[in-house]
Amino acid sequence: MSVALLDIRRGGPGEAPRRQRYEVPFEPGRSVLDGLRWIREHEDPSLAMRYACLNANACKECMMLLDGAVVYACTARLEEREMRLDPLPNKPLLRDLATAIAPPDERPPEPAQPAPAP
């Protein structure tokens, strides 16, 4: 069986990043997003990523780095080789490959922090 090897940056804000590798069954035409969804379904449901495939190529939710280049995971094709995936470097990290995509003025307000005790 042919495989794609996905080397994924894991962790959240304030954590030391770590890398985790997954073997994904390779089929011609499958996207990187298909591979990530396969990992979540068959190997590791804790893998965090974003996608919203309601309007092809318009959502921008699945943007990430593939071997250092910004791609949409839904249009980047899996290959029979090791592929390195990282979150977008210029966006706030939520966890793993998930970053805050919306501009600050479109994000919901952050909850108020309680005042420190006197």
Image (cartoon, rainbow, N blue to C red):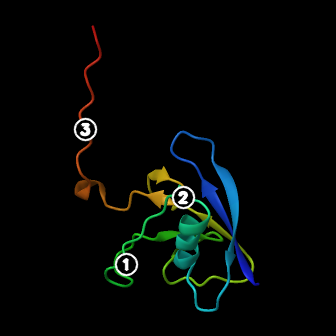
In this rendered view, identify the residue nearer to me: 18 or 28: 28
Give amino acid for label 1: Cys
Sooner in the amino-acid sequence: mark 2 or mark 1: 2
Q: Residue at x 47, y 70 (%)?
A: 63
The local secondary structure at tag 2 comes to loop
Residue at image mark 1 = 53
The local secondary structure at tag 1 comes to loop
In this rendered view, identify the residue nearer to me: 37 or 93: 37
Residue 111, labelled with which disc?
3
Percent coordinates x, y for residue 78 in the rendering: 63, 82
Sooner in the amino-acid sequence: mark 3 or mark 2: 2
Q: Residue at x 71, y 62 (%)?
A: 21
Q: Is residue 115 above or below residue 70?
A: above
Q: Residue at x 58, y 75 (%)?
A: 35
Residue at image mark 2 = 47
Residue 13, labelled with which disc?
none
Q: Residue at x 52, y 60 (%)?
A: 97
The local secondary structure at tag 3 comes to loop
Give amino acid for label 3: Pro
Q: Is residue 113 above or below residue 104?
A: above
- Quadrant, the N terminus: bottom right
Sooner in the amino-acid sequence: mark 3 or mark 1: 1
Label 2, label 1: how many angstroms apart (C-alpha)? 18 Å
- Quarter of the figure with residue 112: top left
